[in-house]
Image (cartoon, grey):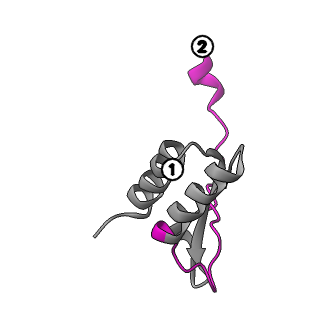
Amino acid sequence: MQTPEERRDEAVAAVIAAGGVVRGSQPMAHPDDPHTVVAYRVLAGSPSNRVRDAVEAVRAETETNLTGLVPWAPEYVEEVEEDEVSNA
């Protein structure tokens, strides 16, 4: 089974191969575990109608159901002040 990152990378490569432009990607998580990425939303564009059709075909092949998912949130990491002695 592929990881979310592998699926994202394949979709990005397919969009580029079709002549499209990747405008970004957004990690998505399950609401019960918002700190674990389960999928990516890939935002793509196209410079022409021909390329748009090719990019739409890529989307149809690679699309994952994102219903119910939420944007991924990094886990909170408590900042620790540096020991002033270590700055010597």
Q: Give 64 or 52, whichever is nearer the viewer.
A: 52
Name the one closer to the observer, 52 or 15.
Answer: 52
Picture disc at residue 55: none
Q: Residue at x 62, y 49 (%)?
A: 51
- From the viewer's perspective, is residue 82 above or below residue 13? above
Indicate left or right for 50 with 39 as reference: right
Q: Dot 1: what SS?
A: helix
Looking at the picture, does residue 22 appear above or below residue 71?
A: above
Q: Residue at x 62, y 84 (%)?
A: 67
Residue drawn at x 63%, y 86% is 68
State which region is magenta: 61-88
Location of residue 54 by image quarter = bottom right
Q: Measuring from the top left, give residue 23's x and y in whole percent.
A: 69, 47
How packed mark 2 is, by other alpha carbons closer than 10 Å (few <14, some 14-19, many 20 or more), is few
Characterize the local packing of mark 1: few (<14), some (14-19) or many (20 or more) Cα atoms within 10 angstroms. Answer: many
Give the total of numbered labels: 2
Q: Is residue 61 left or right of residue 81?
A: left
Mark sitting earlier along the chain (2/1): 1
Closer-to-camera residue (17/77):
17
Q: Position of residue 50 (x, y in %)?
A: 64, 51
Q: Which residue is mark 2?
A: 88
Magenta stretch encompasses residue 65: yes
Q: Which residue is mark 1?
A: 12
Disc 2/disc 1 C-alpha distance (Å): 47 Å
Please state if 4 lies on the left or on the right of 65 as rendered. left
- Looking at the rendered structure, the kind of residue marked 2 is Ala
**82 inside magenta stretch:** yes
Q: If the image is split into quadrants, where does the C terminus sit? A: top right
CB atoms of marks 2 and 1 within 8 Å = no
Q: Quadrant of residue 74?
A: bottom right
Residue 17 in the image: state x and y as whole percent.
Answer: 48, 43
- The answer to which image quadrant residue 21 occupies is top right
